[in-house]
Image (spheres, rainbow, N blue to C red):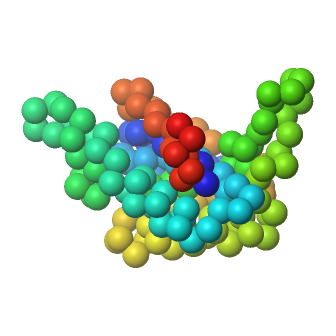
Amino acid sequence: MRAVVQRVSEATVRVDNKVAGEIGKGLLVFLGIGEGDTEKDLEYLVDKVLGLRIFQDENDKMNLSLLDINGEILVISQFTLYGDVRKGKRPSFTDSAHPDIAERMYLEFIDKCKTKEIKTEKGIFGADMKVSLVNDGPVTILLDSKKLF
């Protein structure tokens, strides 16, 4: 399971010109589910994302997590995080999970965030989404549950 996590001051996702999800200060998470990802991968990534200490404390140090600041989270499904372009220039997506499995795990990720009493918004799985954001910092973190990077 992979995630691109961006610290944002605001983010919005639109589908068919309608707002599907919108947050203020918090994290925008682009989430990709890989072939063979398990509950263990899901737990690891939820814990890592919610615990990332990338928000400023009173001394202006990145020392606080989303939970510490009562921030918000917007989760967007993005199978293209598993795009492999090592051969040629057209991405291969054979390492991404089947859509049925990916959607289930995507929704489970969102549910696990909600259980932490975090305002959690989402895109629409499989839809053509338009994502707008104001990256705060900028701060962008790459995560992989297999710890490949």
The x and y percentages for residue 59 are 10, 32
Residue toward you, 11 or 114: 114
Taking the spot 80% from the left edge, 27% from the top edge, the residue there is 86
Residue 71 sits in which quadrant? bottom left
Give the total of numbered labels. 0
Residue 57: tell me if it is visible: yes
The x and y percentages for residue 118 are 37, 65
Residue 11: tell me if it is visible: no
Classify 58 as above or below 64: above
Taking the spot 46% from the left edge, 37% from the top edge, the residue there is 141
Residue 116 sits in which quadrant? bottom left
Classify 56 as above or below 113: above
Taking the spot 29% from the left edge, 44% from the top edge, the residue there is 53
Residue 9 in the figure: left or right of residue 99: left
For the N terminus, the quadrant is bottom right
Residue 68 in the figure: left or right of residue 121: left
Taking the spot 86% from the left edge, 40% from the top edge, the residue there is 92
Classify 87 as above or below 92: above
Residue 34 in the figure: left or right of residue 109: right
The x and y percentages for residue 87 are 86, 27
The x and y percentages for residue 98 are 81, 63
